Image (cartoon, rainbow, N blue to C red):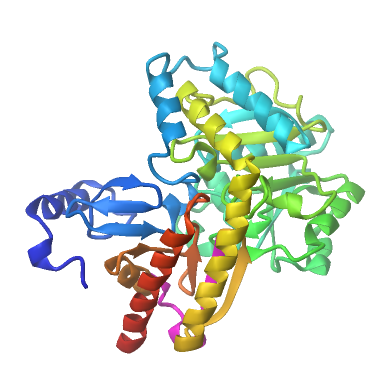
Amino acid sequence: MDRNDDDRTNSRTKALVAAGYRYYVPNYKPRHAIIAHGKGSKLFDLEGHDHIDLGAGIGVNTLGHQHPALVDALTAQARRLWHTSNIYFTEPAVKLAQELVTSSAFATRVFFCNSGSEANEAAIKLVRKWAAQRGKSPREREIITFKGAFHGRTLATVTATAQPKYQDGFEPLPEGFVHCEAFNDEAALENRMSPKTAAVMLEPVQGEGGVIPAKPGFLKFVRALCDRRDALLVVDEVQCGMGRTGKLWCHMWEEGVKPDILTSAKGLGGGFPIGAMLAGAKVAEVLQFGSHGSTFGGNPMACAAARVVLRHVCDPAVMANVHARGLQLHSALKRINDDHAIFAQVRGRGLMIGAVLDDFYQGRSGDLMEIARKHGVLVLQAGPDVVRFLPPLTITADDLAEGMTRLRSAIAEFVRNT
């Protein structure tokens, strides 16, 4: 059933969509639907159609929609205090900082901000300040990142993002970034390292780059290489952290690896904007008074929400669900592929899965995403060739099964049309 048939799309939806296209800066292409409310792993449009949400707002709605503990925490905090700035301490921010440090197993201090881009911007500034304090010249503060990485949309983080499509037209870009052409290639990274290298920055699972996990042993190699070359290791867990892969932090799958800096956002607030940069002992005292800031960083509403998310993600039952639903998702995609031969590969970890389109269907992940929406299941893309799945960590077996049933119908239509 096409959920966008004219006779089923009311005038309010059409008017709002038209207004959105009229008044938004046209850097997005929103779908022709108005999402009205959500519950659990389902979203509902103005016409009342339900959609199984396998994207979670690009990995943001960690606990799904309207989770009772999140609603209670935000309601209670809204009646107390919304904002003070960082001139003062607030209880939610102090307690969240303490809980993040305790659960990280490496950090000693936290900087709060509002997004992943801001968290990565803070990490970049911290690396450069650390190098400066060690007497390194501006040309000796380089940060190595990897082809396929995505670190944000500010000028510094988009330069760190080794994907030209995100940089085009925004030149001149800041200096000080070196791109390693091959992720998971030890020799390529070692060849890029030099006395000018201040840090290596990476995602343990590249998200926007196509859901590409670091291979076993790679993070351990990078950690050891940074130690030998006196460089910092920055781990961007904006998308793959907060339990997304089945552990609180994705780098924890590699035993013994501890970063110097970790960035988090997206799933940290469960839908409420918040970012955080966690700093280990080597760099924790570098940013002194006045060196960096964020007006809304540590907002009590955001921190109240993040404390709830962190508590639930640390619950073994939630992590067990991530493992179980990840296996269920893999298995369902395999069965669909047995019938339709649409995917060349399914990769990822936990509930961060990428299905790579076979050669014949390359370049059409966006088309499949739209057909899936019309069949009542919301998925994502990671570039033109990869269908991405980031469902809520709390999704039930029944909701995931229903989502896969709808996806199967969408893929059947997609294959027929192609």
Residue 245: quadrant of the picture: bottom right
Q: Which residues are magenta?
A: 352-366
Q: Quadrant of the C terminus?
A: bottom left
Residue 367's quadrant in the figure?
A: bottom left
Q: Residue furthest top?
A: 88
Q: Is residue 382 shown to the viewer in this render?
A: no
Q: Quadrant of residue 280?
A: top right
Q: Residue at x 19, y 51 (%)?
A: 46
User: x%, y% of residue 260?
Assistant: 77, 40
89 relative to 296 in the view: left or right: right
What count of labels does the image hold? Answer: 0
- In this view, 13 is above or below 65: below
Front-most of 194 and 211? 211
Residue 17 counted in the magenta span: no
- Relative to 130, is 295 on the left or the right? left
Is 365 magenta? The answer is yes
Residue 272 in view (yes/no): yes
| Residue 124: percent from left, percent from top | 66, 41
Q: Which sits in the foreground, 339 or 381?
A: 339
